[in-house]
Image (cartoon, rainbow, N blue to C red):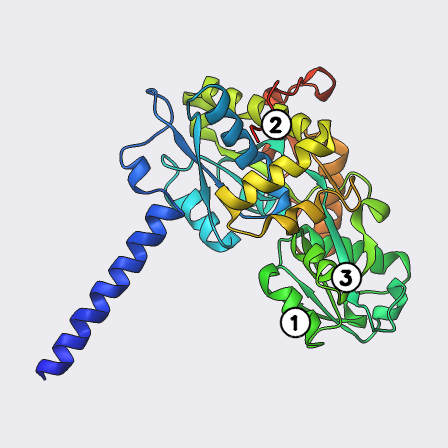
């Protein structure tokens, strides 16, 4: 019995230590022990280590190096379920987050008081097959297994949209849901026939030599958006100035990323090392091959984009169709992309 009690105690301490380590390193619990929006304190903004959310760490890095201040604290998550739980469960600590557009709309349909105030990116996704497969056009997916990130991923709608163009439906393929970080290994082992998610996971298959792009989303759905910046309505009401500064910073950093290939490569280096915990060569590849694989300059919400997502989401059975553009978008924060100026900032070598 003594041995059992000792083992239980050791296991409990170990679990507590792992939890505190995760909270400290990834969620920044201790940096934000009394944090909230306003009152001169930083507030959390949720993100995943994907290119759709790149403007979050880039804005933070530029703020730190130019102004020596932190307007907000980026909070990294490994997947959308835990990000969503934090956003909904602890809104005073993390009142804003990058989130899937259909998920944000679905939350609004469920009565959650949030608003989309800005986009995270445009394009930046693909359908990838094994290089040795016989899949060369959408019709070749018939009878094949395709991995998607989840029910509310816009990649589900991409697939639905492209299948519809050739007279196919989800009944003609086998769709499986899979975390994007697991997709490259699944494709390499041929346990699935095709994968689709946001970058950099699609690029990883190309970089490692076994993936072949069936089509880039930029070529079949120009201006595609997957992730958006959503904010709690209470934060919008009570701390409008802080939210405006956040949106302005993200808009400007997006212009900075797209300003030159040098900036893209610099961002790949400091984001991969300081925020994503990834090898920079992967972000370098995705941000350059081709250069317009994912873009960050036209980030103001546009009604037509979201109405198409609404329509496709309802057709695909993802959305109910009860929330509309005015319900879940607040256009007032987003500056006109034509007037946004990138910060004058160069990374010290």
Residue at the front extreme, as displayed:
349
Q: Which mark is residue 253?
A: 2
The residue at 75%/64% (across/down) is 209
Q: Are marks 3 and 1 in contact (CB under 8 Å)?
A: no
The picture places residue 52, in percent across and down from the top left corner, at 63, 43
Closer to us: 268 or 32: 268
Res. 133 image quadrant: bottom right
Distance Cα–Cα, label 2 vs label 1:
34 Å
Q: Earlier in the sequence, mark 3 or mark 1?
A: 3
The residue at 73%/34% (across/down) is 261
Residue at the left extreme, as displayed:
2
Q: Quadrant of the N terminus?
A: bottom left
Q: Residues within 10 Å of mark 1 (few under 14, many from 20)?
A: some
The picture places residue 10, in percent across and down from the top left corner, at 19, 70
Label 3: which secondary element: strand
The picture places residue 251, in percent across and down from the top left corner, at 62, 25
The picture places residue 259, in percent across and down from the top left corner, at 72, 27
Q: Earlier in the sequence, mark 2 or mark 1?
A: 1
The residue at 60%/39% (across/down) is 54
Q: Are marks 3 and 2 in contact (CB under 8 Å)?
A: no
Q: Earlier in the sequence, mark 3 or mark 2?
A: 3
Q: Which mark is residue 186?
A: 1
């Amino acid at each position: 019995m003594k041995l059992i009690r000792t083992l239980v105690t050791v296991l409990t301490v170990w679990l507590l230590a792992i939890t505190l380590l995760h909270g400290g390193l990834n969620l920044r619990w201790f940096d934000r022990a009394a944090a909230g929006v306003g009152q001169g304190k930083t507030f959390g903004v949720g993100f995943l280590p994907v290119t759709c959310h790149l403007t979050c760490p880039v804005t933070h890095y530029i703020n730190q190096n130019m102004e020596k201040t932190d307007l907000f604290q980026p909070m990294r998550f490994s997947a959308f379920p835990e990000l969503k739980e934090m956003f909904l469960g602890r809104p005073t600590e993390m009142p804003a987050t990058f989130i899937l557009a259909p998920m944000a709309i679905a939350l609004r349909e469920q009565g959650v008081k949030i608003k989309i105030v800005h986009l995270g990116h445009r394009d930046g996704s693909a359908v990838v097959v094994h290089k040795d497969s016989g899949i060369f056009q959408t019709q070749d997916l018939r009878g094949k297994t395709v991995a998607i990130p989840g029910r509310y991923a816009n990649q589900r709608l991409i697939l639905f949209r492209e299948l519809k163009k050739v007279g196919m439906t989800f009944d003609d393929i086998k769709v499986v849901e899979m975390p994007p970080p697991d997709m490259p290994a699944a494709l390499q082992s041929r346990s699935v026939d095709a994968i689709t998610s946001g970058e950099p996971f699609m690029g990883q298959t190309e970089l490692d030599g076994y993936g072949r792009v069936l089509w880039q989303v930029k070529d079949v759905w120009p201006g595609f958006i997957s992730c958006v910046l959503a904010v709690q309505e209470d934060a919008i009401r009570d701390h409008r100035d802080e939210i405006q500064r956040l949106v302005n910073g993200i808009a400007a950093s997006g212009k900075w990323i797209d300003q030159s290939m040098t900036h893209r490569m610099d961002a790949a280096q400091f984001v991969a090392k300081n925020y994503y915990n990834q090898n920079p060569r992967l972000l370098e590849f995705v941000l350059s091959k081709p250069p317009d694989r994912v873009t960050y300059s036209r980030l103001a919400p546009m009604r037509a984009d979201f109405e198409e997502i609404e329509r496709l989401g309802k057709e695909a059975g993802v959305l109910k169709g009860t929330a509309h553009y005015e319900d879940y978008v607040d256009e007032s924060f987003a500056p006109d992309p034509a007037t946004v100026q990138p910060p004058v900032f160069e990374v010290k070598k």
